[in-house]
Amino acid sequence: MPTLFRFIFFCATIAGIIYLAMWSLVVFVEPRERDVTVRIPSEQVNPPEENAGQ
């Protein structure tokens, strides 16, 4: 039974370290705002008709 407690303690410690890392990222890292431009080809916006010339 002691190995089960040791395993549970190990898993809880790893989970705590991961949680602490995520929390510190949320608290200490400030995201930068910037403009994003995405160019979309006109063929995707207005696809050509298949029977346009007939």
Image: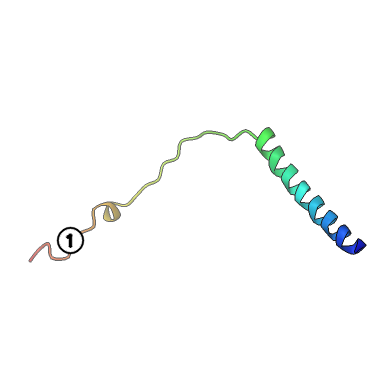
Kind of element beneath mark 1: loop
Please give the name of the residue rendered at 69% of the width and 43% of the height, measured from the top-left corner: 22
Left or right: where 28 falls relative to 49: right
Q: Which residue is mark 1?
A: 49
Q: Position of residue 8 (x, y in %)?
A: 82, 57
Q: Amino acid at mark 1?
A: Glu
Q: Relative to 45, does residue 30 appear above or below in the rendering?
A: above
Residue located 70% across and 39% down the image: 23
- Residue 10: image location, x then y, percent: 84, 56
Residue 32 percent coordinates (x, y)? 56, 34
Colouring used for the render? rainbow
Considering the image in quadrants, where does the C terminus appear? bottom left
Q: Residue drawn at (92%, 61%), measured in percent from left and top?
A: 2
- Seen at 90% across and 63% down, the residue is 3
Q: Is residue 52 left or right of residue 39?
A: left
Where residue 19 sits, quadrant-wise, is top right
Residue at the left extreme, as displayed: 54
- Near mark 1 (Cα within 10 A), the count class, few <14, some 14-19 or many ≥20, is few
Rendered location of residue 20, percent (x, y): 75, 42
Quadrant housing the N terminus: bottom right
- The residue furthest right is 2
Q: Is residue 21 left or right of residue 42?
A: right
Number of labels in the image equals 1
Residue nearest the observer in this picture, 4 or 51: 4
Q: Is residue 24 left or right of residue 2?
A: left
Q: Nearer the viewer, residue 4 or 50?
A: 4
Who is closer to the viewer here, 12 or 30? 12
Q: Name above or below for residue 10 compared with residue 36.
A: below
